[in-house]
Every structure is written in structure tokens, then in C-alpha cells.
Image (cartoon, rainbow, N blue to C red):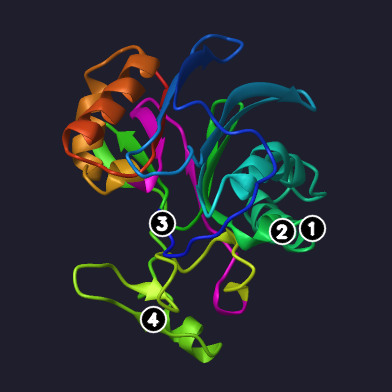
């Protein structure tokens, strides 16, 4: 995901490695995951961050997975990596009503970013998050164009909405902004940002939204796997293509690597970040 703008200066937080991968499993070992992050061809440091882990909390096992795709530096995705799940899980209503508490935590986190005394908020980030509760209940949320796709019996089910400027054009224009498209380019908010919802982006925030799209799903025996990825993957692979590639590879880390490799073969220029969660 990109934004047409340049600036000079430093960002808080360390840069991700240009190529990172790993794997893990639930405590019971029945659910496995793997991830792969590859720096794109653009002339800037890696701006994608991720979370992929299982934790125990209040006698529940939680799988926490996320891709944060930054623009104008890595400060905002680095902040999200450290704070977003903490804010979600500390919402009083989380265990009673995740569908209400997740949006509240997203909005709270965005306000924290915008209120920083440093210039962290001049940059921004999309986000796609997944919380798996006890291996049975899956909660997905997203801002921007990073995407979550579930394989249900081999059928690709998109669990997120791509927040492109045309999607929220009425809201953007109602707030005094505009959506423009140069020849050969994509629609952009005020001629700059290629998504209509994001964390940060202080200069555009009056025209952007930070409330996420949220969807939940019960995991059953027909659920094969979950793919979370930045738009560096989805620009060149369809949901069905990604699912077909991942389902053929038992090791989720190898599956994530193969998805990233395929995106590179198809000449994706953006950073490519992918998490594959295999349920059975």
C-alpha cells in the first residue's frame, strides 16, 4: 500500500529485516502457522510489520495474527505491533462482546498515535488482525487493503473489505476531501493515499476513517486455513489462487514463503507480507 508523498527525517522503532520468516503452533499442537515477509523493490526500508503467536489469557488460548502495512515510514506499524492487541485484549467487554470491543480498541489506538508528541502520526498504516479464541472462534478486523482470506473446504472466503477511496467516497467528500485518479494510477484521497481507512496519516485524518470492518467465523472441520497478507500479495494474486497454492503445502511456513515467491514472480513491487494459519 502506498502514499504519494516524500519527507526527510527519522522514524521511531527499528526497521524489519528485508526478509523474515518463521513458524509456530498452538499449545495443543493442532493449529500451526507460518509467516514470510519480503521487502519490495521500492527505494525505502521495509515498512511491513507482523504479529504471529499463541498466548494464554484468563484460561483461554488466543492465537494473535496481524499484518501492518506502513506508508511514509515504519513508525506507525511498529507502534501497532507493540500496542494494538494489548489495547484490544484490555477492553472490558472483550470476553463478552469482541465485535464491539475490537472497533473501540482500533479507534483508541489511532487516537494514541495521533496524540504522540513525536511526528509518528505523519506516517500511517493499514492493518488486518485475526484473533482465534480457543481454536474455535475467529475474529477478523481490517483497515485499508491488507486482506484476510479463509479456506473453507477449499473455497476462498474473503473475511475483510478493501477500503479503497471509491468505497468511502461519499464520506471523504462529505468531510471536505476529494478522490482523484491520475492516468495510469489508482484513486487516491486528496491525490495522496490509496486507501480510505488507516491508522495515523495526521495530515489526512479529517478525511479518513479509522473504524475497522469486523467479521467473525466459527472454525469447524471444513475450515482448512487462513491467509493474512498485505496488498503486495493481493495486487497480483486472487483469493482463489492464494488458497490453491497454500492448500497444497502442509508446512504453513513453506506455504507463506511460496505465496511471497509467487508474488515476486508476478512482479509485485510492494513489500510482501504473508501469514498462513493451518487448522488441520
* Badge 1 element: loop
Report the disc number at residue 140: none
* Badge 3 element: loop
Asked whether the residues under the numbered discs 1 and 2 touch, taking CB atoms below 8 Å apart as contact, a structural biologist would say yes
Crowding around mark 2 (Cα neighbors within 10 Å: few <14, some 14 to 19, many 20+) is some
Which quadrant of the view contains residue 78? top right
For the residues marked 2 and 4, what is the alpha-carbon distance in whole angstroms?
25 Å
For the residues marked 3 and 1, what is the alpha-carbon distance in whole angstroms?
23 Å
Asked whether the residues under the numbered discs 2 and 4 touch, taking CB atoms below 8 Å apart as contact, a structural biologist would say no
Q: Residue at x 76, y 46 (%)?
A: 87
- The residue under label 2 is 119
Report the disc number at residue 116: 1
Q: Vertically, is 125 above or below 164?
A: above
Q: Earlier in the sequence, mark 2 or mark 4?
A: 2
- The residue under label 3 is 2
Asked whether the residues under the numbered discs 3 and 1 touch, taking CB atoms below 8 Å apart as contact, a structural biologist would say no
Q: Position of residue 240 (x, y in %)?
A: 20, 40
Residue 29 colored magenta? no
- The residue under label 4 is 179
Residue 141 horizontal side relative to residue 34, left or right: right
**For this rendering, which residue is in front, 226 or 15?**
15
Between disc 1 and disc 2, the foreground one is 2
Amino acid at each position: 500500500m502506498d502514499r504519494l508523498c516524500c519527507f526527510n527525517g527519522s522514524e521511531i522503532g527499528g526497521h524489519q529485516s528485508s526478509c523474515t520468516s518463521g513458524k509456530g503452533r498452538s499449545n495443543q499442537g493442532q493449529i500451526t502457522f507460518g509467516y514470510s515477509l519480503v521487502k519490495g523493490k521500492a527505494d525505502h526500508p521495509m515498512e511491513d510489520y507482523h504479529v504471529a503467536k499463541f498466548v494464554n489469557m484468563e484460561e483461554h488460548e488466543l492465537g494473535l495474527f496481524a499484518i501492518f502495512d506502513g506508508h511514509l515510514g515504519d513508525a506507525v506499524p511498529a507502534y501497532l505491533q507493540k500496542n494494538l492487541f494489548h489495547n484490544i485484549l484490555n477492553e472490558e467487554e472483550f470476553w463478552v462482546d469482541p465485535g464491539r470491543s475490537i472497533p473501540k480498541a482500533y479507534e483508541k489506538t489511532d487516537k494514541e498515535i495521533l496524540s504522540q508528541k513525536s511526528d509518528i502520526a505523519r506516517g500511517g498504516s493499514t492493518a488486518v488482525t485475526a484473533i482465534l479464541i480457543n481454536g474455535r472462534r475467529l475474529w477478523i478486523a481490517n483497515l485499508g487493503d491488507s486482506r484476510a482470506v479463509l479456506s473453507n473446504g477449499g473455497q476462498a472466503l474473503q473475511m475483510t473489505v478493501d477500503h479503497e477511496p471509491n468505497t468511502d467516497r461519499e464520506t471523504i467528500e462529505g468531510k471536505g476531501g476529494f478522490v482523484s485518479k491520475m492516468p495510469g494510477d489508482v484513486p487516491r484521497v486528496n491525490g495522496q493515499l490509496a486507501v480510505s481507512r488507516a491508522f495515523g496519516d495526521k495530515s489526512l485524518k479529517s478525511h479518513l476513517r479509522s473504524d475497522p470492518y469486523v467479521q467473525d467465523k466459527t472454525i469447524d472441520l471444513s475450515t482448512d486455513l487462513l491467509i493474512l497478507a498485505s496488498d503486495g500479495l493481493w495486487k497480483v494474486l486472487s483469493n482463489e489462487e492464494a488458497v490453491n497454492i497454500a492448500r497444497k503445502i502442509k508446512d504453513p511456513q513453506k506455504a507463506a514463503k511460496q505465496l511471497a515467491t509467487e508474488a515476486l514472480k508476478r512482479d509485485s513491487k510492494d513489500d510482501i507480507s504473508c501469514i498462513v494459519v493451518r487448522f488441520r
